[in-house]
Image: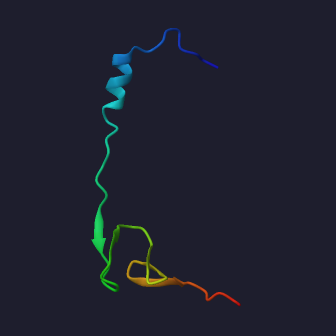
Amino acid sequence: MPNPKRRHSQQRSAKRRTHYKAQEVTLTKDATTGETHVRHRAHVSEGKLFYKGKLVAEKAPLKA
């Protein structure tokens, strides 16, 4: 396997890392529940799981 002959300088590593930036999370309001959530993610509202405004799953009641 090939290995580097010399180590990369700190400047070279820093130049490469300049493109890694923290991005702000995009929020949207659900049309069905009116709740604010992260886009393209399922979210829980009142014990029910919603995705794209549709009910995906409900929490099953506990058996006593």
Q: State the residue lying farthest toward the right.
A: 64
Image coords of residue 63 (percent x, y): 69, 89
Q: Is residue 26 above or below residue 52?
A: above
Residue at image position (39%, 67%) is: 40
In front: 58, or 9? Answer: 58
Residue located farthest toward the front when viewing the structure as drawn: 64
Q: Position of residue 21 (x, y in %)?
A: 31, 41
Residue 27 occupies quadrant: bottom left
Extreme-top residue of the structure: 5
Q: Quadrant of the N terminus?
A: top right
The image quarter containing residue 62 is bottom right
Residue at horizontal 38%, vertical 17%? Answer: 10
Residue 30 vs 28, above or below: the answer is below
Looking at the image, residue 38 lies above or below residue 60: above
Quarter of the picture holding the C terminus: bottom right
Q: Is residue 60 above or below residue 11?
A: below
In this rendering, position of residue 17 left or right of residue 6: left
**Residue 39 rendering spot, x and y as whole percentages:** 35, 67
**The quarter of the displayed image where residue 42 is located:** bottom left
Tell how many labels: 0
Give percent across and percent down for residue 2: 60, 17
Q: Residue at x 31, y 58 (%)?
A: 25
Image colouring? rainbow
**On the picture, is 3 further left or further right than 26?**
right
